[in-house]
Image (cartoon, grey):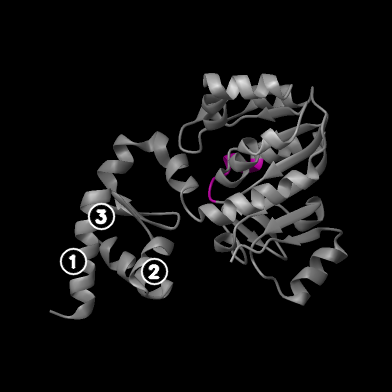
Amino acid sequence: MRKTDKRQMLLRQQLEKDKVLYLADLAKALNLSKETIRKDFDDLAMDDNVERIHGGIRLKRQAILSTHYVFNEKKLVCVESKKAIAYKALSYIDNGQTIYLDCGTTVSYVFEYLSYKSNVRVVTPSIPLLMLYAQEETKAFFESKQHQFIFIGGHVNHHMQTTHGPFFDSMMKAFNIDTMFLSGDAFDFKKGLSNADEVTVSIINAVRPQAHQCIVLVDESKVSKCATFQCLSPKYIDVVITDYMASEDDIDYLSKVQCHFEYVKTK
């Protein structure tokens, strides 16, 4: 049996056990390049019972039974990078401000780090953050820090675990946001933030006019890439925080459109 066949057989067995596999984790565990694992995933995904997801593959029956766990799956990808980026984002939050947090997994870590701040009003359409806030320990922590949690309702997108639509758009007009924090599926230095779902575009269009400052949080796996739907060009972004080591040309371009680049070292 060829090494490739043997490895894919073992990956298939692991997939049957874990239901989902992530490229970055396997490349590190097996001491192989991401490109090698990516090719294995491509071959495995030819099976009708297997589908590609962001950063990995999973069994389709798991996707059908656990659609609402997509957020948790993505949150476990590039964890250390996301935490470091979110922690850096805290330096852009002052006590007493009103902030907007989107439904992204990187942004969700900002919510968890608010213990370092006080009297912050959090405005969000994120259902996972609503569920987290509903827990007694989170409510107690918010009360001790004098934070406020404001959930904006609307139509529910189950895949992205966020609200959106006309009601959401109307409600957002009532707020003056100091800083909005966004994440997405891809970020390109020339084209800006993009996403695989058009819902994100409508949400950002409703929130951006109400926000004084816009900060994008993206880990290196999403940088220098473009997704299907364009969300926000760099000229409408004030700060990009990432663990991607950009070239001087890319940083200069962002500077010309008055977008500040913030590099976070995670390794």
The amino acid type of the residue labelled 2 equals Ala
Question: Relative to residue 135, is residue 205 depicted above or below?
Answer: below
Q: Is residue 246 magenta?
A: no
Q: Are marks 1 and 2 in contact (CB under 8 Å)?
A: no
List the residue tagged with mark 1: 9
Of pointers 3 and 1, the one earlier in the residue sequence? 1
Whole-percent x, y for residue 77 in the image: 47, 53
Magenta extent: 196-201
List the residue tagged with mark 2: 27
142 left or right of 7 in image? right
Whole-percent x, y for residue 221 in the image: 54, 62
| Snapshot quadrant of residue 262 | bottom right
Local SS, label 2: helix
Whole-percent x, y for residue 182 in the image: 67, 45
The circle on residue 233 is none
The circle on residue 15 is 3
State the quadrant of the C terminus. Answer: bottom right
Q: Nearer the viewer, residue 31 or 186?
A: 31
